[in-house]
Amino acid sequence: MFDRLEMAPPDAILGLTEAFRKDPRPEKINLGVGVYKDERNQTPVLRCVKNAEQVLLEKEDTKNYLSIGGDPAFGKAVEQIVFGDDLAASGRIRTVHTPGGTGALRVAADFLFRCFGSKKIWMSDPTWANHPAVFQAAGHTVAKYPYYDPDRKDIRWNAFIDTLRAIPREDVVLLHGCCHNPSGMDLTPAQWAEVAHIAADRGWLPLIDFAYQGLADGLEEDAAGVRALIGTLPEALVCASFSKNFGLYRERCGALSMIAANAHATERVFSQVEKAIRANYSNPPAHGGLIVTTVLNTPDLRDLWVSEVAAMRDRIHTMRQLFVETLAAKGVDQDFSFISRQKGMFSFSGLTPEHVQRLREEYAIYIVGSGRINVAGMMPDNMDRLCEAIASVLKTTA
Ligand code: LMR
């Protein structure tokens, strides 16, 4: 029967990485997948991670299974970082360790299907290319709410909140906690408060994808939206990832936090989430979670981590400014200043699929087909070449 199968198309983001790896041109630049690069074009292991691994090498005394939801110490450490001390102490939150942020989304999706059947999951237009697939694979349907206006390079605020106001009770609304992927346009604290108010009024369930904490304005600042929602609403789900802010990409370390009205209800949710996990991967891989727990629970490693996240964030900010300035210096007439206002790794460049194709074929520059660029993949050394290539395709594409 396998001979009847057709070839599946390459993944919109990870498929690009495969094509990039195979490209023999030495000058190639990858602005596709959301992976941080330092000034030497490396994705380094953070020093706090290396130090924690040394501690683990000495101290780790078993490779026995973790429990279904992972180590409770990991859950506590994550809750403190994501929700802050007060909410973390409220007793309303339980957290499971998942294989990456994508794994957290899938566990959330499986839990919802298991307990409530097929739901409508509302996603921002645009959203991360993999969001629809994760929820559809678990049996849900997907709907869109307006979010980013590519002409004004801004949030479609009125259309956004009008749609949120019309979403029925117990539908699920997927929100980006910070560093909106792909647009880089985040809500302000006042806008988060308004979204929380609407959610409370309408009774839909927020599911927050929180994959980039620390890469916009700061670890605390970036959590403001999540905390505003959790502080206001009785129920929510939050999916965190430690791929980017700990650089643990291939360790697949994420977390799903469940928030209910009180500790008893949260325990019941937790028990159902455990069932969803057991039927999928049984229990999580340990290494990434042990690293995160060790770093967060060791004061000097935690300080080191905070400073390393700040260094990544600052470098991304610097690249945003340099990109805008260099494009102007290379004679690009279009206004790209919006890129310096956007947050996190990504921006919607406004480049068309034709521009993207020409950049790849003629200049070995890889960008997601939607025009999303990973600013964290830019370097001072490749900025001139990158901006010259963009200037050229902008001038000469019909
Ligand atoms: C991205 O958006 O590039 C990252 O989240 C990596 C991925 O899995 O797509």
Image: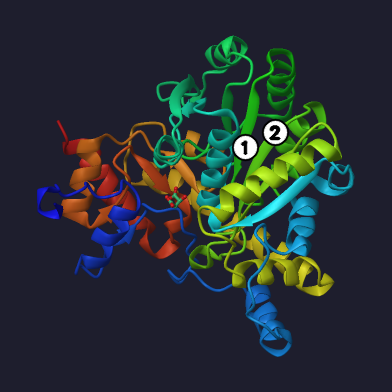
Which label was assigned to residue 208?
1
Which residue appears at 64% of the width and 77% of the height?
Answer: 64
Is 394 left or right of 142, judged from the image as shown? left
Position of 74 relative to 131 (above/below)? below
Q: CA distance from mark 2 to mark 1?
A: 8 Å
Colour pattern: rainbow
Which residue appears at 28% of the width and 50% of the height?
Answer: 388
Secondary structure of the residue carrying numbered label 2: strand
Which residue appears at 22% of the width and 46% of the height?
Answer: 9
List the residue tagged with mark 2.
236
Tag 2–tag 1 contact (CB < 8 Å): yes
Position of 368 relative to 98 (above/below)? above
Classify mark 1: residues with Cα within 10 Å, few (<14), some (14-19) or many (20+): many
Q: Nearer the viewer, mark 2 or mark 1?
A: 2
Count the marks: how many?
2
Is residue 385 visible to the viewer in this orientation of the structure?
Answer: no
Is 249 left or right of 213, judged from the image as shown? left
Position of 303 relative to 317 (above/below)? below
Q: Choose top left, top right, bottom left or bottom right for residue 57.
A: bottom right
Is 92 left or right of 362, judged from the image as shown? right
Q: Nearer the viewer, residue 46 or 110?
A: 110
Tag 1: amino acid: Ile
Q: Choose top left, top right, bottom left or bottom right for residue 2.
A: bottom left
